[in-house]
Image (cartoon, grey):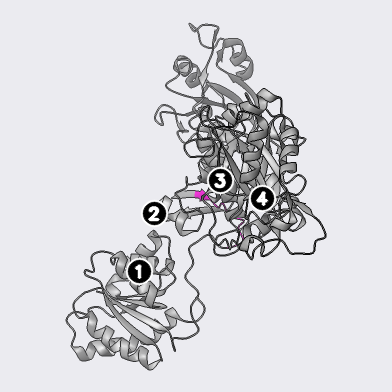
Amino acid sequence: MQLPDGLVAVVKRDCPTCVLVEPVLRGLGAAVWCQDDPGWFAGDDTSLELSWRLRVETVPTLLRVEGGAETARVVGWSRPQWEELSGVSGLGAGLPEHRPGCGSLSVDPDRVDALEARFGDGLASRRVELADREDEHEAAFARGWTDGLPVVPPTPERVLAMLRGTSRDPGEVVAVVPPDLVPCTVEKVAVNAVLAGCRPEHLPVVLAAVEAACADEFALHGLLATTYFSGPVVVVNGRITRRIGMNSGVNALGQGNRANATIGRALQLVVRNVGGGRPGEVDRATLGNPGKYTFCFAEREEGSPFAPLAADRGVPGDAVTVFAGAGVQPVVDQLSRDPGSLARTFAACLRSVAHPKLVLAFDALLVVSPEHGRVFRGAGWDRARLVAELEQLLTLPVGELVRGAGGMAEGMPAGSGADELPKFRPGGLLVAHAGGDAGLFSAVIGGWVSGTSGSAPVTREVRT
Amino acid sequence: MRTVLDPTGERAPASRQLRPRPDGLAGRTVGLLDISKARGDVVLDRLAELLEREGARVLRFRKPTFARPAPVDLRQEIAERCEVVIEALAD
Amino acid sequence: MHDIADLEARGVVGVFLASEAFAEAARVQGESLGFPAPVVLVPHPVQDRTDEELRAVAEAVAPAVVAAVTGPA
C-alpha cells in the first residue's frame, strides 16, 4: 500500500486519546485510518493490514510521509511533538500537554498470530486450501497426515504461535529425517507439533527429540523398517520438564498428561509426515506396540537415587534421551528390602527381554519406581553401582543359552568359545527413575537390536 | 477458504489423488452400484453386457436409497470384492 | 460422490455416472469434498425414455466409462 505524502495517522475510536485528538487530526487534514470504526475517518483499517505493516503499537500514531516513505513518527498525544512533526503551532487548544495513547489492535495478543499469518510471508510450508464443505479433521485423515487419531489442523496462525515456543529460526534444518531423508526445518517440526496437540512451550523438547532420533547411531530408518515392535521412547530431563508440566510421577508411562502425550506424538508425526515412515509401507512391524502413538515421559529427578539420566550420559540440564523401546514389561517385587535382593529381581526380569536365551542382541531401559528407588538410595547405590551389579548377575552360562538348551530351539549358536556371555552389550542397559509414590513395581522397556546393526540410545540438549 | 500448512516433506501433491487406474478391464472385477433411481437399471444392464464383452467380471450392487451414502457394510463388501466400481445413475 | 470418495479411499477405482442435469452438482460436490471424483455424463432425462433409448445411452457412454477407470489416472 502506497502511503499518501503529508500527515498520516492511525487511530482507534475505542481509545479516549484518539477521541481527544480527533479535532486536531481533522484540522491538520491528516489522512486517518481507523482500526475499529470504518465510518469515523476516511481510512478504513478494520483489517488492521496498514497497522500491521506500519508496526503500529500505540494509537494514535502520527506519521510524516515523504515520497511514500515514513520520515517521522510520534505516538500518543504530545502537543510539542505533534507541533514539531506537523510544523504547525498552536495545536489542540484546550487539550492537555500530553496524553498517553492506547494499545493498537494490531498488537493484541489474540490477533497478532492471525495478522502475521495473513500479511506476513514468513512461513515456507506449502499452503493447502481446504474445500468449502471439507471437514477439517476428515481432510487430515484423507491426506494421510494422522496416526489414526484426530489431529489439530495446522493453520498458519497456530503454526506461528507454535514457533514462538523457540528462538530458533523457522528455516533452520533440525535433522534429515528417514526414511525419505528429507531435511526437516524448525517450521516443519512446528507444523507437526500443532498436529500432535503440543503447546508452544513443548516445541523445544520436540525439536531436541527429532534431532536425537535422527542421529546416525539411533538408526531410525532401520528402527522403522524392522518387523520388530520398537519405536522411539523419549525420556526428558531437567527443569524444563516441570516448567512445561511433564509427568514423571503417577502413571508416568501412561495416558493423561498433555506434554508427555503430545511431545512423543509429535516426534512420531514428524517421522510419518516429513520422513515418510508409514506403517504398511516402510514400517513393516509384525505387531508394533501402542507406544508407537506416543511414548514420552520425564525422569523423576527429585528423590532419585541416581543422577539425571542425561547428565550421566554427558548432557547435564535440559535434555532428551531417545531409546528404541518395544513396550512395557512389569517388574513386581514387594518383599526385597536390600539392594542385592532387588537387583536379583531386576536381573531375573531383564533376562527375559526378547528371549531369556538371547544375549548381546537387545538393549533395555529399566525404569525404577520411587519405592524401589528408596531401597537403593538408602543403601547408597548410584546408577553405576546398580548397573555393575546387574551386569554381573546377567553374565550367563553359555550352557543355558545355546540352541536346544532347555528344550528350546531358539538360543545362541554353539561354538563361541566362551563359557559365559553378558545379556547386554556395554552401555546397552539404561536406568531411569519415574513413577508414583506408591507401588513396589518397576518396569523393563525392552529395546531393539543394539550395536552396529541396530540402534544406540542418543542424548541431546534441549535448546530454547 | 480455510488454509492449513502441509506437514509433509512435500514430495507428493497435497490434493487428494485418484487411485492409479488399471491398464484395462480384462480379468478385473467391476462392481455396478445401482443408486436405486427409476430406470437406471436398464442402463446398467446394458453397461454390464458391454463390460463383460471387455473381459470384465461384473458384480451388481444396489444401495437402498439414492438420497444417502451407501451403508458401510455395502461399501465394505464392494471394496472386498471389486477392483473397480461404477455408480449410476443420478438423474 | 461420497460413495466414490469412500471407495477410492478403500482401494477401489471408481467413477460416477450422472445425467447432464447433475453435471454442476457433481462438479461442485467433488470440489467441496476436495476430491477430483471422475464423472461421466449421460443425456438428460433418463426416467421417461424407452428401454431401447436407454440401451443406446449405455452404448454411447460405455467408452467414456471405461476410459475413466483405466489408463493413467
- Mark 2: give few (<14), some (14-19) or many (20+) Cα within 10 Å: some
| Amino acid type at mark 1 | Gln
Q: Is residue B9 magenta?
A: yes
Q: Gap in Å between the C-alphas at discs 2 and 1?
A: 27 Å
Residue under the point 39% across and 30% down: A39
Circle 3 is placed at which residue position? A328
The quarter in which the N terminus of chain A is drawn is top right
The subunit carrying tag 1 is: B
- Magenta highlight range: B4-12
Is A205 displayed left or right of C58 in the figure? right
Quadrant assignment, res C14: bottom left
Query: Label 1's element?
Result: helix
Q: Position of residue A219 (x, y in %)?
A: 71, 54
Q: Gap in Å between the C-alphas at discs 4 and 1?
A: 38 Å
Residue under the point 66% across and 56% down: A357
Residue under the point 21% across and 91% down: C52
Circle 1 is placed at which residue position? B76
Q: Gap in Å between the C-alphas at discs 2 and 3?
A: 44 Å
